[in-house]
Image (cartoon, helix red, strand yellow):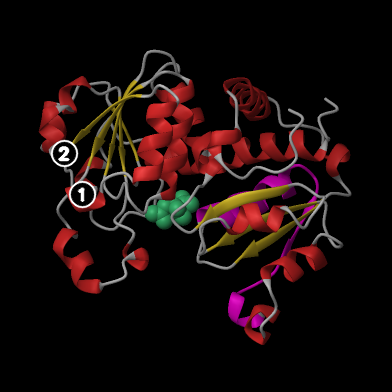
Amino acid sequence: MDRNHVISAKDLSRADIETVLDRATEIKRDPPCRERHVDDLLALCFFEPSTRTHMSFETAIKRLGGDALDMGPVEASSATKGESLADTVRVVEGYADALVLRHPSEGAAMMASEFVDVPLINAGDGAGQHPTQTLLDLYTMREAAGGLTDLTVGIMGDLKYGRTVHSLAYALTKFDARQHFVSPESLSLPRSVRYDLHESGARLKEHTDLDAVLAELDVLYVTRIQRERFPDENEYRQVAGEYRIDAATLEQARDDCVVMHPLPRVDEIAPDVDATEHANYFAQAHNGVPVRMALLDLLLDGGER
Ligand code: NCD
């Protein structure tokens, strides 16, 4: 893998993705020697809340033998003094060997990457992209659904604002998956994403009702309604709680249908699903560590492996 920044799933080839997933499999089986990354420092710059992404990146660099450098909460950073994002990342790149950035503005990671030479990893830019979530999603699908070829995947919930959805859809297209998008009309895929998917030959269908496709699915990927991105709270209330599954819903699914969710969940997957064979979302979250270890291992090596 010879690329520097990781900004959008659109830029990851099928070979890039397979390289990271294969390395993650090796790492899970046989954790790498910590000596190789002992001097590596990873800067974590989170301008939006995060639990999994932040903690799993921190775990990943520490398990590789390196260390993390956390910008801390936005309120305690120089952003409150009016510093631009470009200046912040230019300063931070002088402290660290790679940078993880989460920001509420779509396009922020792309913009910031133009100002730094160390690898910059997009950990979520507004409603844009979240490519490392996609890597762990695909890793989980490969493990739980037995491979990435010939998959039928249902993606349900907030397809408009959900950045995990946009990244996943681009990546699944590279594996020629059949994709069924299920949402209320007001939260369907953004026009730009739909256009990109069609341009790259995606096999996709859009639905307002899960029943229409549930029985066909190898994977059902459920997402949270992204309340914080709604310009109007009333609009959120109109769709909140509409797309929700429970154990009874899954009686219509295939026995081996894998249920995933990037988490956090609010109420879109009832707790009674947790005890079923379908539930894979906690294993999915745990896979963030080997997958991010693999990505960092490859990026920090500068493609020398
Ligand atoms: C997601 C995100 O931040 O986009 N969370 C995550 O990284 N696992 C999904 C979400 O917040 O709904």
CB at disc 2 and ligand 1 closer than 8 Å: no
As drawn, 176 above or below 127: above
Residue for point 28% across, 58% down: 266
Front residue of 170 and 101: 170
Q: Secondary structure at mark 2?
A: loop
Q: Is residue 285 left or right of residue 30?
A: left
CB at disc 1 and ligand 1 closer than 8 Å: no
Quadrant hosting residue 200: top left
The location of residue 285, given as percent across then percent down, is 47, 44
- Is residue 232 among the parts visible in the rendering? yes
The C terminus sits in image quarter: top right
Q: Which disc, if any, is residue 247?
A: 2
Magenta region, residue range: 52-76
Q: Amino acid at mark 1?
A: Ala
Task: Tell whether position 151 is magenta.
Answer: no
Task: Tell whether position 63 is magenta.
Answer: yes
Q: Which disc, if any, is residue 270?
A: 1
Decide: few, some or many residues near mark 1? Use Cα within 10 Å; few <14, some 14-19, many ≥20: some
Q: CA distance from mark 1 to mark 2?
A: 7 Å
Quadrant hosting residue 231: bottom left
Main secondary structure type of the part rendered in magenta? helix
Front residue of 40 and 304: 304
Residue for point 65% across, 72% down: 72
Q: Is residue 225 left or right of residue 300?
A: left
Front residue of 8 and 52: 8
The location of residue 189, given as percent across then percent down, is 31, 44
